[in-house]
Amino acid sequence: CGDGHTVAMSSDGEVFAWGRDLSFADGASDGDGDSYQWRLPDASNGLAGEAVDVAAGSSHIACVSLTGDTYVWGQNHHGQCASCPGQDVESTFLSTPVRVGGYLAQAVARRVACGRYHTAVLSAEGAVFTFGSGLSGQLGRPFVTTFAGDRSPSSASALHAWQPDRVSFEGCIEGGGASPVLIVQVVCGDEHTICLTDTGRVIAFGSGDCGQLGIGGVRSHRSPVLVRTLGGIGEVVAGSDWSLFRGRNCKVHLAGKAGGSTSEETVFLRQIVAPTR
């Protein structure tokens, strides 16, 4: 779910979207006094029979097809749809699904996750590609600051934030040697990203102002960092400013701000579900 809209995928791969009309930017009016226009479930904007995963950001939608391609549509003011955010309507709003190019065109995408204004894609080989807003470090990689309409070539060491690029996890796992870090799941909060490795370790980056990275404290990280206190994790989930980690032993840990949490509590990783005997 996004901010007022929902996207879902049927068992045969059809994509349905309903709720807020994404052609209206956050807080915009439709001219009749209503904040947004609303739509019923509709598969006309989807990719019939092709989707294997879908996700929604605050005002954009991402989809991975059976052929391993990534498609995005919706608002693109922050480059979350992998297009240069200019000042014209064509560059700030994508009305229909558009195939993502760049480095992602060479990868086989399998899963996708959306933050508020950023997108993360997991490839079949266990690599993560990110694009969109990176002001809080949620892209986990270096990037060139993008100004509206700036399509100038990026440097050799970093691409623009709106250009999909691979996240480097080199050196994240101590004792890993030369073995590559393989990611099996990626999830996004509003401004943070959580990755789960094939060995059950958790890597996080982005905003930590509510303790949502699970590393203790409220420091944000622009580069991937290992959550050292967690191991044997089988699944991760992320929300606006919180993260959940389910261990293979069925223990569940929470990081970040949940309903009723005090500022002191959010700093620490805490167990909220214990395994039943």
Image: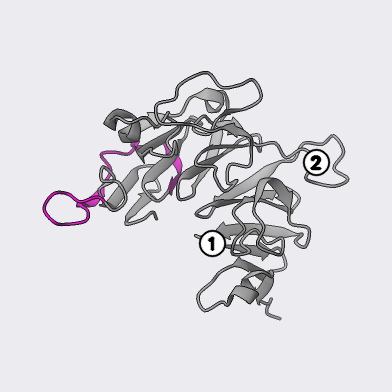
- The C terminus, quarter of image: bottom right
* Quadrant hosting residue 268: bottom right
- The N terminus, quarter of image: bottom left
Of all residues, the one furthest to the bottom in this rendering is: 277
Q: Which amino acid does label 2 sit on?
A: Gly
> Label 1 belongs to which residue?
241
Give yes or no for residue 40 being in the magenta stretch.
yes
Crowding at label 2, few (<14), some or many (≥20) Cα neighbours within 10 Å?
some
* Quadrant hosting residue 14: top left
Q: Which residue is drawn at 56% across and 25% down?
A: 103
Q: How many labels does the image show?
A: 2
Q: Which amino acid does label 1 sit on?
A: Asp
Which range is magenta? 28-56
Residue 254: give x, y in percent of width and height: 62, 68
Let me know if residue 12 appears in the view: no
Marks 2 and 1 sit apart, C-alpha to C-alpha, by 26 Å
Give yes or no for residue 275 being in the magenta stretch.
no
Task: Specify which label sits upstream in the sequence, 2 or 1.
Answer: 2
> Label 2 belongs to which residue?
171
Let me know if residue 15 appears in the view: yes
